[in-house]
Amino acid sequence: MTTHESPLAPEWLAVPEDLNALQPLLWAEGVQKNDAGEVTIDGIAASALKEQFGTPLFVMSETDFRSRARAFKDAFDAAFADICGGVDVYYAGKSFLCTAVAQWVADEGLRLDTCSGGELAVAAHAGVPGSHLGLHGNNKSDAEINRALDMNVGRIVVDSLDELERVAIIASSRGTRANVMLRLTPGVHAHTHEFIATAHEDQKFGLSMAGDTTDEEGLSAAEEAVAAAVAYDSIELLGLHCHIGSQIFEPDGFALAAQKLLGFQAAMQQKYSIVMPELDLGGGYGIAYTPVDTPRPPADIAQAMAAVVRATCAELGITAPRISIEPGRAIVGSTTFTLYETGTTKTVRVDGPADTEEPDNVTYPRRYVSVDGGMSDNARPVLYDADYSAILASRNSSAAPQLSRVVGKHCESGDIVVRDVYLPADVAAGDLLAVPGTGAYCWALSSNYNYLARPGVVAVRDGVARLIVRGETEEDLLNRDMGVANV
Ligand code: PLP
């Protein structure tokens, strides 16, 4: 154990060689430290961002977003060019969506995956053509289905047999055909470096491919859906879809899922004398939240997936369908950091881990550093035990590293932003902290818990910072409250 290493730290967390240095993999293009030790983005210092926009604040690099979007599109297009002429990349809007981002997505030649009427409304507001939209969701309302048909969306990804029937009835009543993909559960679950394959699924999404499900003839729900879709005049069956998980680093799980879906596709095409021209392999590509995360470049994953699709189609003797993917986090996650102001700090003494050889009465310090946001702007640590990293953003420090926990200001003891990080021991009220990797599923999951106003989002490009979503005000917080007169 080095001098400052704490026995309370998780095994993966090392004491950084230089507490003042940024770990490039965690940060967006254009983020650096200046001579005064301030975090800057395109040369704009953290203190200037605070001054102009306040904290907490999501700070997003538009340049980085666009280049990650292009990197996915280019890498997958190149890898699949000889297989199916390229890939349609649907940016998963659930990870972060606002009008500006929808426009960047369209500008960069990507399409947009939505999963609610609200996300469709943002897409419409941004002027994304309906043909470039997908609609997901395990419980779409009739209104959402109608809205998707009004907008002529390119695809509705159907999640259940009863939804398929509803889409067919609604489309028929409108005298139109709905473009449909069927979301299947291939029994492949991937998480970081491992994946598991199971026959049966116990989750709310998708149609099971296991062959012992609902039908008397012993058809799987997936096959029942294909048979039903073929029989409906008002359904245009584009193809199959799967999404096997999130924060996945290795391509093996994607490859196995592709193999399973292509096998099923070949069997269905033969049995029902149909051709399904498309196949969507979902999203889930991992990013670096901490220095130990090791995402692969999009080209590596694209090539591994392409090799499997190429070989499987050849083996099955089918024409490869047009492939699409749905990355969210891998495009937006690392584009953004959250800027917080530090408030109260305190140090508690904690018993050592159970396996320590120290006597029972030895305790270790853990520093709690409170910031002016918390679980309302980043629910992922509470929801998924997600790990993040943080750095002092307003100055350099020569103080010793101290194991710290960055916590929010909410009335929950689980209100943790960064569970374990080494920060300089002199971090104090008024300092700024920056937490990288907060582009995906942070603002999107934000809440008004404890009546905190949700932070704004600033986009930085070519040295200019502009608000793309303004922060809420106290007036916003009160404007749905109907007041005493209506009680
Ligand atoms: N597609 C579907 C159907 C999803 O459910 C999700 C995330 O939950 C995504 C795409 C995007 O996943 P990620 O942001 O991990 O790429």
Image (cartoon, rainbow, N blue to C red):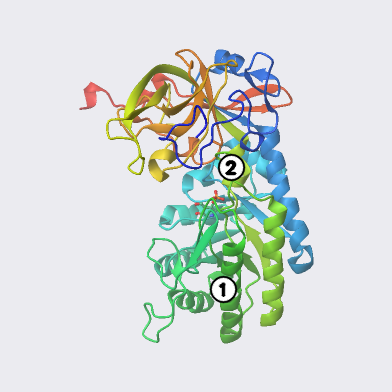
Instruction: Examine the image and state in which quarter residue 199 appears.
Output: bottom left
Question: Vertically, is 466 above or below 26?
Answer: above
Q: Residue at x 47, y 42 (%)?
A: 11
Tell me if I can see residue 321 in this picture.
no
Residue 410, x across and y down, in percent? 34, 27
Would you say 272 lies left or right of 301 here?
left
Q: Residue at x 44, y 13 (%)?
A: 429
Tell me which amino acid carries mark 2: Ala
Where is the C terminus found, in terms of image quarters?
A: top left
- According to the picture, the residue beneath numbered tag 1 turns out to be 260
Tell me if I can see residue 356 in this picture.
yes
| Label 1 – label 2 distance at C-alpha | 29 Å
The answer to whether the residues at label 1 and label 2 have Cβ atoms under 8 Å apart is no
Tell me which amino acid carries mark 1: Lys
469, 83: nearer the viewer: 83
Badge 2 element? loop
Residue 102, x across and y down, in percent? 62, 41
Of labels 1 and 2, earlier in sequence is: 1
Question: Vertically, is 249 above or below 27?
Answer: below
Badge 1 element? helix
- According to the picture, the residue beneath numbered tag 2 turns out to be 288
Residue 435, x across and y down, in percent? 53, 30
